[in-house]
Amino acid sequence: MTFVQCKLDVDRNQAEYEVEFYAAGVEYEVDVDALTGEILSYQQDRA
């Protein structure tokens, strides 16, 4: 796995982490609630 970036963002008055990484030739983008750790959304694309 290769970590790309993680940043804290406030979207719709909700703090969330935006995380990007690569694993096994696939790029993942995950939005995680900063308070609860709940995964809010994710995307995966072949790199």
Image (cartoon, rainbow, N blue to C red):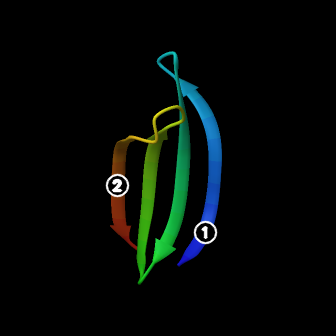
- Asked if disc 2 and disc 1 are in contact, CB closer than 8 Å, the reply is no
The residue type indicated by label 1 comes to Phe
Q: In which quarter of the view is residue 10 placed? A: top right
> What percent of the width, then of the height, locates residue 23?
45, 77
Q: Is residue 44 above or below residue 31?
A: below
The residue type indicated by label 2 comes to Gln
Question: Residue at point 43% right, 62% down?
Answer: 28
For disc 2, the marked residue is 43
For disc 1, the marked residue is 3
The residues tagged by marks 2 and 1 sit, at their Cα atoms, a distance apart of 15 Å
Q: Nearer the viewer, mark 2 or mark 1?
A: 1
Please state which of residues 22 and 14 is positioned toward the viewer in this rendering.
Answer: 14
Question: Residue at point 54% right, 35% down?
Answer: 34
Instruction: Look at the image and tell me whether residue 47 can be seen.
Output: no
Q: Residues within 10 Å of mark 1 (few under 14, many from 20)?
A: few
User: What secondary structure is found at the residue carrying circle 2?
Assistant: strand
Question: Residue at point 45% right, 44% down?
Answer: 31
